[in-house]
């Protein structure tokens, strides 16, 4: 569910739009409605205004706007949880309007949507603030998925994809770097090699996770050999995880 707040004094004025993406450097901005798809782009330097109605899709914390015509294209991707967004506005040929809209390419990078003024003068307060649902916790740098029974755990970095798996039964340690993908509240880690495979799926909204670590042949590592094994972790709560072996308390 997408929840947005607006200052009461300005809510009537901006009822068409409830999402704002504003460039960190140049200040031009894109406003759009997350339900109807109506949008307005304002280029502060030239005074050009482009409006229309695109298609909106939501996927967890992510909101996407797509508008494609013969002469122009508007694309936007916003992460409501992280309060960050990006947008591309391309006008391929002159558009008849008052005033006429010339060909242009604008790329918006917004690292903090909560600081948006959605005004070229910057005089208006930031009214486009997405309220994070209480069940969603801030994105972590490291995620731990741990076996409840013996404490075997997989810890991975959500940015770099670097991970370490410790098999508590025999002390084996397997480390490497995989690919991390995000999809709304979900995080995925994947590292598939000929000798072994490491997969993890974590839901930051429910704070649950699963992992599968399979070593097919004996593998030499800096910490010593890792013999063939299969470890499947189902973690009902990530909140009490540690990087220590032993049953979870």
Image: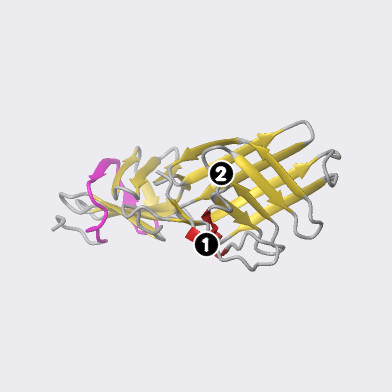
Counting from the top left corner in percent of width and height, residue 76 is at 61, 45
Residue drawn 35% across and 37% down? 216
Instruction: Give the left or right position of residue 162, taking residue 75 as reference.
Output: left
Q: Where is residue 132 in the image (x, y as percent from the top left)?
A: 40, 55
Please name the residue that numbered disc 1 is placed on.
114
Question: Which one is nearer the viewer's eye here, 3 or 108?
Answer: 3
Residue displayed at 69% across by 64% down? 25
Q: Is residue 241 magenta?
A: yes
Q: Which mark is residue 173?
A: none
Residue sitting nearer the eye, 163 or 207: 207
Q: Which secondary structure lies at badge 1?
A: helix
Q: How far apart are marks 1 and 2 (CA)?
A: 16 Å
Describe residue 224's horizontal placement relative to residue 95 as left or right: left
**Residue toward you, 117 or 142:** 117
Q: Quadrant of the N terminus?
A: top left
Q: What stretch is highlighted in magenta?
A: 221-242
Read off the residue under disc 2: 33
Instruction: Give the farthest residue toward the top.
Output: 70
Q: In which quarter of the image is the C terminus?
A: bottom left
* Colouring scheme, one of rainbow, by chain, secondary structure, one colour: secondary structure
Where's residue 15, x and y in %?
55, 48
Residue plotted at (52% across, 54% down): 11
């Amino acid at each position: 569910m997408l929840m947005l707040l607006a200052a009461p004094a300005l809510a009537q004025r901006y009822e068409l739009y409830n999402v704002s993406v504003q460039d960190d450097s140049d200040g031009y901005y894109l406003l759009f409605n997350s339900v109807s798809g109506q949008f307005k782009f304002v280029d502060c330097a030239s005074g050009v205004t482009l409006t229309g109605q695109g298609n909106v899709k939501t996927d967890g914390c992510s909101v996407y706007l797509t508008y494609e015509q013969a002469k122009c294209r508007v694309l936007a991707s916003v992460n409501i949880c992280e309060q960050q967004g990006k947008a591309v506005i391309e006008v391929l040929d002159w558009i008849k309007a008052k005033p006429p809209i010339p060909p242009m390419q604008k790329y918006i990078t917004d690292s903090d949507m909560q600081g948006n003024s959605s005004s070229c003068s910057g005089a208006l307060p930031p009214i486009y603030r997405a309220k994070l649902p209480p069940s969603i916790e801030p994105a972590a740098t490291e995620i731990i998925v741990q076996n409840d029974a013996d404490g075997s755990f997989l810890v991975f970095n959500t940015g770099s994809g670097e991970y370490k798996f410790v098999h508590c039964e025999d002390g084996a340690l397997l480390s490497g770097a995989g690919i991390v993908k995000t999809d709304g509240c979900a995080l995925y880690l994947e590292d598939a090699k000929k000798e072994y495979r490491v997969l993890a799926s974590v839901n930051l909204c429910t704070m649950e996770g699963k992992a599968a670590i399979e070593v097919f042949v004996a593998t030499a590592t800096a910490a010593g050999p890792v013999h063939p094994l299969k470890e499947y972790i189902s973690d009902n709560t990530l909140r009490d995880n540690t990087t220590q072996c032993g049953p979870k308390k």
